[in-house]
Amino acid sequence: MSTEAPEARPLSHDPAWPRTGAWPPVDGAPADLVIVGIPTSQTSLSPSNAHETPAAVREALRRYSSHLVAQGAPGERGDEAEWVLDEALRIVNAGDLADPDTEAGERAAVERVQQLAASAQLLVALGGDNALTVPAALGVAGDDLATAGLITLDAHHDLRDGRSNGSPVRRLVEAGLDPRRIVQIGIADFANSRAYRQRAKDLGVTVIHRDELRTRPLAEIVDEALEVAGAGGGPIHVDLDVDVCDRSVAPGCPASIPGGIGADELRIATRLLASDARVRGIDIAEVDASADAADGRTVRLAALLVLEAAAGLAARLGR
C-alpha cells in the first residue's frame, strides 16, 4: 500500500475527462475572461504568505474540469443548460503583477488591470490579501470611477486607517469611489468595531449583515447589491474575501471565524454576480495557501470561484 500523501501524487490522465486551467497567455487579442495574479501580502495585519496563493490557485484548477450543468426552475428536470467553459469562452492568463504592495507597484498594477479589463468581458484577479482590491477595483473602474460601484462579500468592513489589507474600502472611497454605491455582504459579529461600523454608516455604505443571509434568499440579496452598486451606470467590481466563509471551509484565511457563510453560498453568489453585465471585475482575496488545511480546501474553493465566475460569464453571454 502506498503511503504517499494524496496531495503529492500526480494527477491522473484521462483524455475523455480534460482538466481545466491550462489557459494561454495574453496575446493582445480580445478575450472573454482574463485571469491575473495580484500577489499582495506585505501590508497584512497578520503574518501572511498570501503572495503564494495565485500560483496555488492555478495549480488547484487542474483538479477540475470546465464542464457544468445548470438546472432550470425547481421541478423542471428536463430544463437544463450544459457548458464546457473552455470551449464556450476564450480564457487567457496574464500571469502575476510585480511588487503590488509598493506604491509604484500598485500604480503599475492599476494601469495593467485597466489595460486587461478593456480587452475582456470580465477580469478575475487572484490575491493576495485584501490589499489587492485597491488596484483591482481602480483598474476595472478606469476613467469611470465616479460612476463605478463595489460589492464586497466579506466578514469585515475594511475601513481601517492606514495602508493594509484592512483598509481597501476606505482607500477606494478616498480615491473617489462613491460610498453610496458600495455594498458589503456578510459583515460578521465579533469581527469589527463600533468605530468602523459607524464609519460605514456615516459614509452611506449599504451593509448586509451576516444574519440577513440566514433569513433572506441569496438571489434577492445579490439583486439588491447590484441595484445599489450599479446605480451610477458605471462598472461594478466584486471583492470576494474568502474569510466571509466559515472557518471549517476556509482555514487558509487568517481572519475566518466559525459561523461564516458556506462554500456553496459563496459559489452561488459568485455565479450570480458574474452573470450580470455590469460586473466587469472580480477579485479573490485573503487566502494564504501556506496556512491551508492539509487537503487544500481553501485554495480549492478559490479555484472553484474562478470557475463559478466563468460560468456566470458564459450564462451572461448566452454561450
Image (cartoon, rainbow, N blue to C red):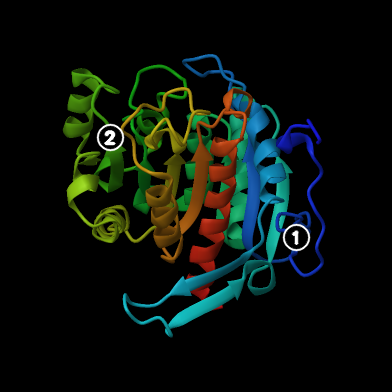
- Mark closest to the chain's N terminus, 1 or 2: 1
> In the rendered image, which quarter is residue 23 located in?
bottom right
* Amino acid found under the numbered disc labelled 2: Ile
Question: Image quadrant for the N terminus?
Answer: top right
Write down the residue under mark 2.
187
Measuring from the top left, give residue 229's x and y in whole percent: 31, 53
Secondary structure under badge 2? strand
Write down the residue under mark 1.
28
Measuring from the top left, give residue 187's x and y in whole percent: 28, 34
Instruction: Tell me: residue 138, above or below residue 190.
Output: below
* Amino acid found under the numbered disc labelled 1: Gly
Question: Image quadrant for the C terminus?
Answer: bottom right
Measuring from the top left, give residue 206's x and y in whole percent: 22, 43
Q: Is residue 235 among what the camera can see? A: no
Q: Nearer the viewer, residue 238 or 80?
A: 80
Residue, x 40% and y 25% (percent of image)? 167
